[in-house]
Image: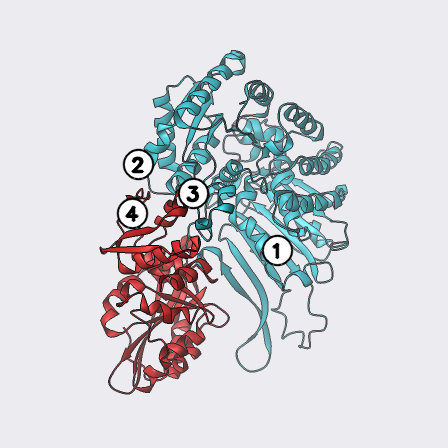
Chain colours: A cyan, B red
Amino acid sequence: MALAEDQRIENPLLEGLQLSRRPEPCAMVIFGASGDLTKRKLFPALYSLAYRQLLPEKFGIVGVARTEESDDGFRERMKAAVQEFGRDDFRDDVWEWLADGMHYVAGTAEDGDDVFVHIDETLTDFDRDRGTSGNRVYYLAVPPPAFETIVKGIGKHRSKQGWTRLIVEKPFGHDLQSAQELNTLLHKHFDENEIFRIDHYLGKETVQNMLALRFANGIFEPIWNRQFVDHIQITVAETIGIEGRADYYEHAGAIRDIFQNHLLQLIALTAMEPPIDFAADSVRNEKVKVLKSMHTPGPKHVVRGQYGLGYIEGQEVPGYREEQGVDPSSMTETFIAAKLFVDNWRWADTPIYIRAGKRLARRETTIAIQFKGAPHPPFEEAAAEGLRPNVLLIHIQPDEGVSLAIGAKVPGQGLQIRTVHMDFLYGGAFRTDLPEAYERLLIDCMRGDASLFTREDEVIEQWQLVDAIVAFWRRDRPSFPNYAAGTWGPPSSDELLRRDGRSWRRH
Amino acid sequence: MATALDTVSAIERKLAALRLADEGSRLRTNVMTHIAWVPEEWVEAAEDVLAGLAERHPSRTIVLFPQSAGAGLEGKVESESFPMSEGLTICTDTIRIRLHGTSAEHPASVVEPLLVPDLPVFLRWRGVPPFGESAFDELIGVADRLIVDSTEWPGLPKPYARMAEIFDRLAVSDIAWARTSRWRPMLASLWPAIAKVERIKVTGTEAQAQLLAGWLRSRLDRSIGLEHEPSNKLVGVELDGEPAPFPPGDPPIPADLLSDELDKLSRDPVYEAAVIAAV
């Protein structure tokens, strides 16, 4: 029962009603329908949205991939995917509603225009039979080499009525030049406000909670700056290896896989100024300012590593060069650590240490704001030896939440100080399951809300920084592998902080 | 259940002891204090709704059972834990207090020391509140939001007039109003034809009929006649003799209705106007 905004203005009965925020009718076309992303993330997300009646009432899906498959075959495969990877109970009625509007088109770039004609016919049928009104979401869940043909095909056959939106999965380019070329290609067929560059980290509830934490709590703003913050540590650690994605990872490495997108977005959200509102461009304008303010780190401020054989959860795991499909002499980095600076009034001279990598000691994504110590602790040195600086720790995953490390008196005689943690566990206060990032992002795109998607200028700034780092990496050849799987990266990562009299947070 | 505690201090000590007895992995995240005033005849229904609520809204729940006889109070404290992800459990407290004699007339002095500081206080009142009496007056003084279910009230719409008098003191939720929430968007979708309606017939509870009629009167700013056909749930609405389409979806269960109201913090001016127009 979605009611239009203009009807709300003149209809007094609408006041105070919590109307359905279901998006307008639309059809979604997924290129890469036989891929892992579609199976593990997109369909489970679509099912969860259908389960909660959040998808448009009039909706249809066209899956496109090179594999020959019938509509029924596609439905069965996606049903199995939802049952395996979905977070909700499997309900036949929900699935049947979704499956009823699912079609499959087999095709490749070699098929030329035929595949797009076929897609267009299916979408026209949707408009007629399912009332999708010419509104289209195209999802590019395909490797970058396929982008050009698909974008041109969509552009040629785009609907003359309704709206058209394009979701582009990472990697968005391989370097600055390729990102600019991709932007040029996209802009030949789409306006910037029709392009939704996805970084699924931004769809995570806890990443968005950063905005709530910073801008809904007056206590943090006065101390969220160089005067009170000693430094910031951001960790994106994975225990998994490359999971059979050697083709992609050999070309990407940690810097393109994590640093260019997720890590720089986390830095931007941590360091940005308060936006005037939460409109898409207000937030993105502030994030871009942070990215523009980041100066290129020198070679001594960036560490790269590659894992060798080691142990994860007690089991031996191979080194990166032994992974299937990886060049035995590969120089691809699986770990990156850096000391970065945001050169603006708020953060000048405040280091932001980042580290990200695969096969690290534990899975964790955290942002740690380490505050400066008390100016003159009146305690005896021995009494305060257990005291560490205050740290505001934002857990992005797992254990989503926030904790604050504070000094407290140990009960008993004398005045012994120890650091204790005050924890807020996200799921403990709000007893609802956290939605998967893709659910939020898909529905936002259908509603036309680009707040959690990356804008062109953000991508350009991100690549400029990455290109500068990669440029000096070309000049040396580190001795890889330089850390054992299951550890916290190469010793030079620890040295990066030790030089400054600091250390990575203990875990 | 633990042995009865006869002073507020004893209840506080018991709460502290339970907290210390917790295993380290238990969390005590609270989002509110939930007070329930449960006269004897509502005990069974109240316990049914309370079951499962704490799990959805981590809170300190204080259930007050006013007693006509005796003196003093008898309290019992329970700590419940609910499993969460990553092997953690969340822990919430339920305090049940039988109030006798003056403590039933002046419950605020019992309740105030037990509120979780700085968090919203929701007061669930079973049956018709005794508007103007000290117990009710004191408790709405400590609460941020009153939750009633006017379906439980005899003699409607008269009690609505008394309730309207407290709208300036705290926010009010009415579960009877929440039960009309599926129907209101449906009726709103009949705009503009519905603007000229003269008479509404509601097959449902008295409260639902009165509130829907009050809502139409207040929103359309004119007089509209009401015909009520009793039913224990809202099953039909006619506008000037024409049946309105049945809204989609299933009606929510009582625990969900209360749970939803516990998520609301601000006043509902549309509901308040409907109550005033229902009288």
Q: Secondary structure at mark 4?
A: strand
The residue carrying mark 4 is B238
Q: Kindly identify the amino acid type of the residue bearing the numbered disc 3.
A: Pro
Residue A144 lies, in percent from the top left, at 59, 25
Rendered position, A301 above or below A248: below
Which chain is mark 4 on?
A: B
| Label 1 and label 2 in one chain | yes
What's the CA distance linking mark 3 and mark 2? 34 Å
Residue B33 lies, in percent from the top left, at 42, 69
Residue at x 45%, y 33% (from the top left corner): A25
What's the CA distance linking mark 1 and mark 3? 55 Å
What's the CA distance linking mark 3 and mark 4? 16 Å
Residue B115 lies, in percent from the top left, at 44, 74
Residue A331 seen from this side: no
In the picture, the disc for residue B192 is: 3
Q: Kindly identify the amino acid type of the residue bearing the numbered disc 1.
A: Ala
What's the CA distance linking mark 1 and mark 2? 45 Å
Task: Confirm or deny contact between disc 1 and disc 2 (CB under 8 A).
Answer: no
Q: Would you call the spot at circle 1 few (<14 residues within 10 Å), some (14-19), or many (20 or more)? A: many
Badge nearest the viewer, 3 or 2? 3
Badge nearest the viewer, 1 or 2? 2
In the picture, the disc for residue A93 is: 2
Q: Kindly identify the amino acid type of the residue bearing the numbered disc 2.
A: Asp
The residue carrying mark 1 is A368
Q: Would you call the spot at circle 4 few (<14 residues within 10 Å), some (14-19), or many (20 or more)? A: some
Q: Kindly identify the amino acid type of the residue bearing the numbered disc 4.
A: Glu
